[in-house]
Image (spheres, rainbow, N blue to C red):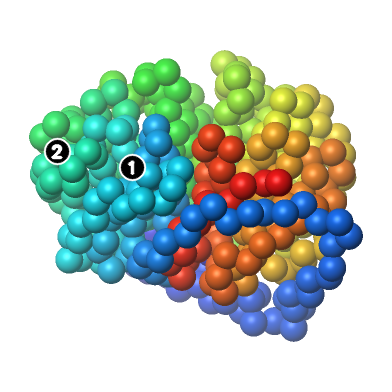
């Protein structure tokens, strides 16, 4: 749940792994027990399929049109009909995969643990090309405007031609001494820019045409006596609603602002590696204790906080309609009210963690567990 060519990269990984695993093993992290819900909202299972496991990585299913694309660490890549779960194709690259797929509906691209990037025809699953970026990739590829953007663990952004796999540009970003080993997902705006978070408490925009930095903003300056205390990475993809961008950092802050201003309108102390989700007037996030909190998106005023699922390791949340959904480490999908954060319902997908955000499509909510369940539910 939570990188450099030099020794500092190895040290980073070891220290972060030790730090997070020691937290999870502490008695202070005793997960809250689930209690009955009065008059719960039903989450009706519409379909469910068994796919390969994604542990220890966090694979996020990708929706394009009526198709859902996903993968498993053993090398399987899948395409399903999002409405009924029908399998449309499945291929196996016979190599360990380290992140989920990216797709624009024309091609599907997937990275391996060795840094090989595989591309397939989205309609048929036919292999198109493969190329090496020479190092591990933990971020799902971004496929947009005829390009495939790859983000490597040594903090390079590499753009490949979507038709051929040939390299178009490379942007080597600086790296903090210690960084979270996380996905640092990317998004695009108008097929022109890439928005993403960086280590050191920053987030920003890159030009899709050449990879140049358009701007970056400091959300949360690192603080503390040790390098571990100074970790302040924006490891989750910032969310964008209209022109409002919201971001959150680990051991740092949460904030929102206008994307054109390259600055936050407000920030509040907060610590999260699972990201934000927005409604028209609020932003929601899960902190590193699994408290779900709602903030006024215009001024940052805390609206409510739900502490009832402490240490259940809630995954990336989704705001849809009038509710919020988030999975937990025991395979439960929880339903919360946006107006007050109350728990309204839950369903158990399986017994393994759900870290990826649920995916909404045509009245359904699709979730993927790390144990290999891909399922669609309808809120009744």
- Residue drawn at x 82%, y 48% as measured from the top left: 341
Q: Is residue 200 left or right of residue 294?
A: left
Viewer-closest of 29 and 107: 107
Residue 204 location (% of width, % of height) = 50, 31
Which residue position is annotated with label 2?
Answer: 165
Which residue position is annotated with label 1?
Answer: 102
The reply to whether residue 279 is in sight is: yes
Q: Is residue 371 left or right of residue 209?
A: right
Q: Is residue 18 above or below residue 116?
A: below
Residue 217 location (% of width, % of height) = 57, 30
2 vs 1, front mark: 1
- How crowded pointer 1 is (Cα within 10 Å; few <14, some 14-19, many 20+) is rated as many
The reply to whether residue 254 is in sight is: no
Q: Is residue 320 left or right of residue 140?
A: right
Q: Secondary structure at mark 1?
A: strand
- Residue drawn at x 74%, y 83% as measured from the top left: 27
- How crowded pointer 2 is (Cα within 10 Å; few <14, some 14-19, many 20+) is rated as some
| Quarter residue 158 falls in | top left
- Residue drawn at x 71%, y 60% as measured from the top left: 346
| Distance CA(mark 2)–CA(mark 1) | 14 Å
């Amino acid at each position: 749940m939570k990188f450099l060519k030099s020794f500092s990269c190895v040290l980073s990984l070891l220290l972060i792994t030790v730090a997070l695993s020691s937290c999870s093993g502490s008695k202070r992290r005793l997960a809250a027990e689930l209690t009955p819900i009065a008059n719960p909202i039903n989450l009706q299972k519409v379909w469910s399929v068994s796919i390969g496991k994604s542990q220890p990585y966090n694979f996020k299913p990708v929706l394009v049109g009526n198709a859902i694309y996903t993968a498993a660490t053993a090398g399987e890549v899948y395409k399903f009909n999002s409405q009924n779960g029908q399998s449309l194709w499945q291929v196996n690259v016979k190599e360990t995969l380290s992140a989920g797929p990216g797709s624009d509906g024309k091609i599907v691209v997937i990275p391996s643990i060795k840094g090989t990037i595989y591309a397939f025809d989205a309609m048929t699953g036919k292999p198109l090309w493969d190329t090496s970026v020479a190092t591990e990739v933990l971020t799902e590829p971004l496929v947009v405007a005829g390009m495939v953007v790859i983000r490597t663990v040594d903090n390079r952004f590499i753009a490949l031609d979507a038709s051929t796999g040939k390299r178009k540009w490379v942007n080597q970003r600086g790296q903090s001494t210690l960084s979270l080993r996380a996905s640092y997902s990317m998004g695009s705006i108008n097929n022109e820019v890439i928005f993403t978070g960086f280590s050191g408490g920053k987030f920003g925009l890159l030009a899709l045409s050449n990879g140049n930095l358009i701007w970056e903003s400091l959300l949360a300056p690192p603080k503390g006596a040790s390098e571990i205390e100074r970790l302040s990475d924006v490891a989750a993809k910032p969310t964008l609603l209209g022109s409002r961008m919201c971001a959150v950092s680990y051991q740092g802050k949460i904030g929102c602002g206008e994307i054109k201003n390259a600055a936050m309108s407000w920030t509040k102390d907060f610590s999260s590696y699972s990201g934000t989700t927005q409604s028209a007037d609020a932003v929601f996030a899960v902190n590193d204790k699994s408290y779900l909190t709602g903030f006024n998106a215009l001024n940052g005023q805390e609206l409510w906080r739900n502490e009832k699922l402490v240490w259940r390791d809630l995954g990336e949340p989704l705001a849809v309609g009038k509710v919020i959904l988030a999975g937990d480490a025991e395979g439960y999908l929880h339903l919360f009210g946006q107006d007050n954060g109350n728990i309204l319902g839950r369903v158990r997908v399986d017994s393994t963690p759900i870290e990826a955000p649920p995916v909404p499509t045509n009245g359904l909510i699709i979730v993927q567990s790390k144990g290999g369940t891909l399922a669609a539910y309808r809120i009744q």
